[in-house]
Image: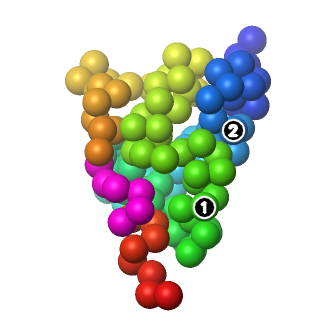
Amino acid sequence: MKRTIEEIARQTGRYSPAAFKFVYEGLGYTVQNVTKEPRHVSGQILCEGLRRMALERYGRLALLVLKSWGLRTTRDFGQIVYILIDNEWMSAQPTDSIDDFNDVYDFEAAFRDQFAF
């Protein structure tokens, strides 16, 4: 029996269950709003979809919300993706790599610096 996202998050202990749910929901958001190829979403494209979804949902609070879940870099998105792959919640192509999530963008620039205070 497949474990729930909450169980997976609790077992790994690094990120909150909300972070796992956000990344999982972000895949659907990315397919609908960012890419035109629903068959495969690269790590870089998923990061862009997650950025847009976070800003849409949380606005100026996006950086604070993501950090409260343990997310500080795009590599953190990749860590969650690969945990979900290992637990059969997502899948990957043979050419995919966790390194596809390395330094896609800087969190401060992507979630904070664009707003004028």
Kind of residue at badge 1: Leu
Percent x, y for residue 103?
A: 29, 45
Kind of residue at badge 2: Ser
Percent x, y for residue 25?
A: 59, 48
Cα distance between the residues tagged 2 and 1 = 14 Å
Residue 106: in magenta span? yes
Percent x, y for residue 92?
A: 38, 25
Q: Which mark is residue 16?
A: 2
Residue with the mark numbered 1: 64
Residue at 58% x, 51% y: name it. 67
In the displayed structure image, the side of residue 16 where residue 37 appears, left or right: left
Note whether 86 is above or below 115 in the view shown. Answer: above
In terms of sequence position, does the residue under pointer 2 or pointer 1 come before the other? 2
Q: For mark 2, does the 10 Å Cα neighbourhood hold few (<14), some (14 to 19), or many (20 or more) residues?
A: some
Residue at 47% x, 30% y: name it. 79
Residue at 52% x, 32% y: name it. 80
